[in-house]
């Protein structure tokens, strides 16, 4: 039977033997009675083959990672994709902070929580939020594939901005340059191998860049970076 879920406004049946995913999917449980939009099916043979490539990872971790990749590839059929990022909701909008592992994107969103308060900032997903284009808008969606700390909420929030973070000794912000967009985006998403699917992914991201403010943020490793980002991203929207 698997686990029935509502993820990114889609009916999803998750048929995967994975304790971590089963626990993190509880808040997404939804007992739909129709055919699922997406069936996430990962066999134990697939998990074992994956572990041969990454022997340092447990079988449960491998199943978790494979199931996420499976879901996000199918999400393209519903005008959706993943951006490796820490995504938060503030004042009804989603702010997504993307960067390579170890750059400090989760630390940066933690500073937003410290600056604005837990009652005003909600984590959407701290690792792999889904993005969907629905009714003419881009939305950031929580998913159970949310990293080692399972920081996610089953919410769907209009995207306010996408921000690519890089480490810096001083805070700065600038719009992303057209020539660097794909260089920054490609390493932070699931890239399909099929040409048709890749074309659709590129079309969706090109549309997102036109509809949503996209920035590069040079961030110091302290709370001043959050204060700087809020003033130059959130407050700028209200000008």
Image (tube, rainbow, N blue to C red):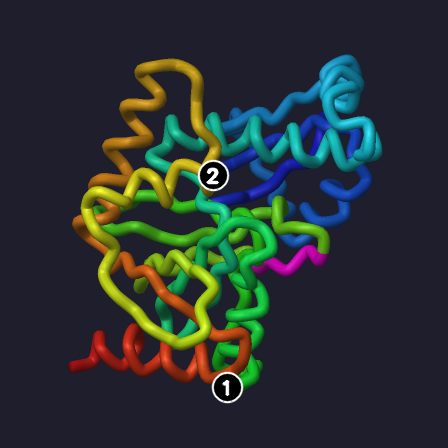
Q: Is residue 152 within the magenta segment?
A: yes
Q: 51 or 216, which lies in front?
A: 216
| Residue 52 percent across, percent down from the top left | 78, 19
Q: Is residue 222 within the magenta segment?
A: no
Q: Is residue 226 above or below residue 37?
A: below
For disc 1, the marked residue is 115
| Residue 62 numbered mark, or none | none
| Residue 10 numbered mark, or none | 2
Identified at 24% across, 32% down, the residue is 203
Predominant SS along the magenta part: loop
- Location of residue 95 (image quadrant): bottom left
Element type where label 1 sits in the image: helix
| Residue 70 percent across, percent down from the top left | 56, 27
Identified at 58% across, 69% down, the residue is 107
Magenta range is 149-153
Q: Is residue 37 left or right of residue 176?
A: right
Element type where label 2 sits in the image: strand
- Location of residue 45 (image quadrant): top right
Identified at 31% across, 62% down, the residue is 161
| Residue 138 percent across, percent down from the top left | 30, 50
Identified at 56% across, 84% down, the residue is 114
The disc, 1 or 2, on the residue closer to the chain's N-terminal end is 2
């Amino acid at each position: 039977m698997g686990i029935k879920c509502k993820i990114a406004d889609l009916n999803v049946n998750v048929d995967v033997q994975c304790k971590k995913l089963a626990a993190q999917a509880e808040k997404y449980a939804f007992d739909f009675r129709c055919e699922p939009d997406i069936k996430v099916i990962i066999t134990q043979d697939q998990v074992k083959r994956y572990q041969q490539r990454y022997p340092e990872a447990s079988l449960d971790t491998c199943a978790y990672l494979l199931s996420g990749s499976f879901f996000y590839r199918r999400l393209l059929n519903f005008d959706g994709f993943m951006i490796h990022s820490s995504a938060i909701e503030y004042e009804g909008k989603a702010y997504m902070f993307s960067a390579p592992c170890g750059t400090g994107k989760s630390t940066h969103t933690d500073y937003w929580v410290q600056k604005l308060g837990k009652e005003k900032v909600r984590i959407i997903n701290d690792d792999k939020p889904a993005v969907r284009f629905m009714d003419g808008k881009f939305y950031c969606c929580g998913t159970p594939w949310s990293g080692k700390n399972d920081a996610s909420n089953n919410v769907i929030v209009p995207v306010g901005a996408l921000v690519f973070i890089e480490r810096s000794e001083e805070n700065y912000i600038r719009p992303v340059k057209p020539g660097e967009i794909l260089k920054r985006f490609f390493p932070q998403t699931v890239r399909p191998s099929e040409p048709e699917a890749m074309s659709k992914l590129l079309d969706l991201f090109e549309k997102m860049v036109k509809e949503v403010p996209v920035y590069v943020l040079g961030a110091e490793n302290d709370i001043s970076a959050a204060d700087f980002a809020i003033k130059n991203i959130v407050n700028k929207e209200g000008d």
